[in-house]
Image (cartoon, grey):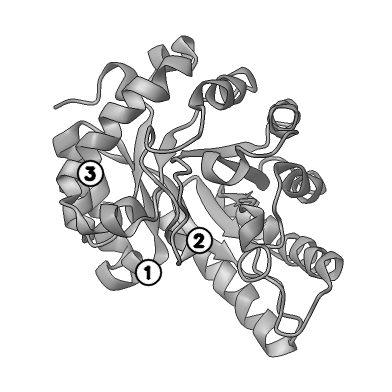
Amino acid sequence: MSATGTARRLSINQWTVRRASIPELVSAAVGAGVPAVGLWREALAEFGVADTARAVVDAGLRVSSLCRGGFFTDPEPRAARAAHDGNLRAIEEAHDVGAPVLVLVAGGLPAGSRDLAGARERVRDAIGAIADAAAAAQVVLAIEPLHPMYVADRAVVSTLGQALDIAEQFPADAVGVVVDTFHVWWDPEVLAQIARAGRGGRIASYQVCDFPTPIPADVLLARGMMGDGHIDFGPLTSAVSAAGYRGDVEVEIFNQDIWDADPSGVVRLARERFEALVAPFLDPAAEDAR
């Protein structure tokens, strides 16, 4: 199956098929006619950065993003230095595998802290300390706001507006934002904030998955395949298109049942759901440019 028509901007994020190795991910993408993959640093460490880059290129694929950097909120000096150094390495890895975007997860509240404002200031300062390195490597740091249920332990940046408040303090070629449907669909301001992001050229990545209920005990695994939950992908995708985003659209799903399924079947289903629920709302002119 070739990457034609409405699938030309589709990318499969590696965590959607988490148990697949790099070669298995590449094979599943090629077999389903998916032209791009989003990679994770853990898999790079296991398979090797150079070998991963070679496998992707040899298969005729492109890399849409690298996950992840961030976790900036610990004020303890040694922890802050370790996070800084780790993020510099992540920028290098993104450059070396051809990823134009490094996704950033802000980090949650430090143990015992209730100071959200202070944590967000540390996120801003830490991004400022690596923004020049990202620009030099031609890698955009993409701040991903996470659903508010993750604010305590994973991300003190919860809305697209908050992410833009930080990103707009830096050049657009260095710092942008991720629009992830799972995390932002509930926000009554999301369409206005997508438009704001578009005006500044700040949308670095668009990720799609659904919000099914009931939410599992492990809320990290609450994401579902498009069409299996409550999200209306039309308005969000139309807004992202109208904002000028022309990059890949990643399917990123954390879900134990999906992880346990055959990776090739998951990727084929993702393409089917993408073509039915997301692609009709993408800009046809951008499709023609692929």
The number of callouts visible is 3
Q: Residue 88 location, x and y as percent?
A: 58, 68
Task: Please tell me whether mark 1 sits on a helix, a strand or a loop.
Answer: helix
Q: Of label 2 and label 1, which has the lower sequence position?
A: 1
What is the distance, in whole Å, between disc 1 and disc 3 at their CAs? 21 Å
Disc number at residue 88? none
Q: Is residue 216 left or right of residue 135?
A: left
What is the distance, in whole Å, between disc 3 and disc 2 at their CAs? 22 Å
- Asked where in the image residue 11 lies, by quadrant, the reply is top left
**What residue did someone put label 1 on?**
42
**What's under tag 2, amino acid-wise?**
Arg
Disc number at residue 266? 3
Task: Please tell me whether mark 3 sits on a helix, a strand or a loop.
Answer: helix
Q: Are marks 3 and 2 in contact (CB under 8 Å)?
A: no
In the rendered image, the vertical position of residue 38 relative to residue 181, given as above or below:
below
Q: Residues within 10 Å of mark 2 (few under 14, many from 20)?
A: many
Residue at image location 71% in from the left, 73% down from the top: 109
Q: Residues within 10 Å of mark 3 (few under 14, many from 20)?
A: many
Q: Of label 3 and label 2, which has the lower sequence position?
A: 2
Disc number at residue 68? 2
Which of the two marks, 1 or 3, is nearer to us in this view?
3
Residue at image location 51% in from the left, 33% down from the top: 231
**What's under tag 3, amino acid-wise?**
Val
Q: Residue 238 location, x and y as percent?
A: 56, 19
Q: Is residue 127 left or right of residue 59?
A: right
Q: Residues within 10 Å of mark 1 (few under 14, many from 20)?
A: few
Q: Are marks 1 and 3 in contact (CB under 8 Å)?
A: no
